[in-house]
Amino acid sequence: MKVFVDANIFLDNYYNRRDALLPIGEFAFNFFKETFQCKFEIVVCKEVVGEVAVILDKDYEKTFSLVFAGLLCRRKLSLVDATQKQKSLAFELSKKRHVPYSDALYGIISQELRIPIVTRDNHFFDELVELIEAFKPENLP
């Protein structure tokens, strides 16, 4: 199953995060484990890598090496470039739905690729729910 993966899932895994009730880092880890077992193929755009880089306070190349390169080497990751049209549509959608630009962009890319997004971001489950199919890692089919 091909899926677009939001930056928060990579960060959940990297930091082994927990929320008040759930081991979200463990859910992310299990998702990536299943990816390596060929259940999923991950798609991201360069903006996802950039978003993770900002949070990790590292440059793009170091972040890619730390977080994404293992997936790419094992052919479990496709890196796509957002088109200018997608970026323009994301800007408009962001304003219209009052969601962050990055969420709008990821939603548009996912929609155009006709693949679900794996995320914990409530914008996808609330404001963007009719545009794109979204799953939390622990709820994937």
Image: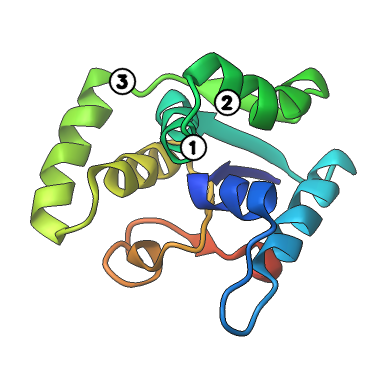
Tell me which label, 1 or 2, sits earlier in the chain. 1
The residue that disc 3 covers is 83
Report, in whole angstroms, how far the alpha carbon at label 3 lies from the one at label 2.
22 Å
Q: Position of residue 55 (x, y in %)?
A: 45, 41
Residue 6 visible in this rendered orientation of the protein = no
Q: Residue furthest front?
A: 57
Q: Position of residue 112 (x, y in %)?
A: 39, 37
Asked where in the image residue 86 lies, by quadrant, the reply is top left
- Mark 3 or 2: in front is 2
Tell me whether circle 3 and circle 1 mark residues in contact (CB < 8 Å).
no
Nearest to the observer: residue 124 or residue 52: 52
Residue displayed at 58% across by 48% down: 11
Q: Amino acid at mark 2?
A: Thr
Q: Quadrant of the C terminus?
A: bottom right
Q: Residue furthest bottom?
A: 21
Could you say whether the residue bearing mark 2 is in a helix, strand or loop? helix
Image mark for residue 63 = 2
Could you say whether the residue bearing mark 1 is in a helix, strand or loop? helix
Q: Amino acid at mark 3?
A: Thr
Task: Give the total number of marks visible in the rendering.
Answer: 3
Report, in whole angstroms, how far the alpha carbon at label 1 lies from the one at label 2.
7 Å
Q: Please, is residue 95 above or below residue 123 in the view?
A: above
